[in-house]
Amino acid sequence: MKNCVRAAARYKKDVALAVERQSSLEQSKAQLELDWQRRYEDLERLQYAQSEELVRTLSSARNEVLSTWIFFFC
């Protein structure tokens, strides 16, 4: 009888530890997903900003060339 009680207590303890590990793993997975999402969004913002800067630079260069041509041909 004592062996059955000990085995049941051990089983309950093992199940409780397994549930705790599972919960911890699920939290870690959720946090990892959030971290990757944040990294992706950060890189997306950076790429957008770099594209905007490229457009500004190209527009400025175009305007400079056009103003030089107008001055040269007028």
Image: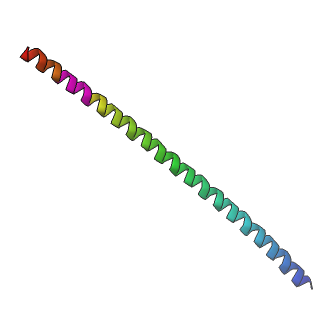
Where residue 62 sits in the image (x, y, percent)?
20, 27
Residue 27 or residue 64, whichever sits in front: 64
Please tell me which residue is depicted at 47% across the width and 42% down the height of the picture. 42
Q: Is residue 20 above or below residue 11?
A: above
Where residue 46 sits in the image (x, y, percent)?
41, 39
Task: Based on the picture, tell me whether residue 61 belongs to the magenta stretch.
Answer: yes
Quadrant housing the N terminus: bottom right
Residue 23: quadrant of the picture: bottom right
Task: Based on the picture, tell me whether residue 4 belongs to the magenta stretch.
Answer: no
Majority secondary structure of magenta residues: helix
Residue 44: quadrant of the picture: top left
Please tell me which residue is depicted at 51% across the width and 51% down the height of the picture. 36
Quadrant housing the C terminus: top left
Please tell me which residue is depicted at 17% across the width and 18% down the height of the picture. 67
Decide if residue 67 is on the left or right side of residue 53: left
Give the magenta range. Answer: 58-65
Please tell me which residue is depicted at 19% across the width and 21% down the height of the picture. 64
Q: Residue furthest front?
A: 74
Decide if residue 39 is on the left or right side of residue 14: left
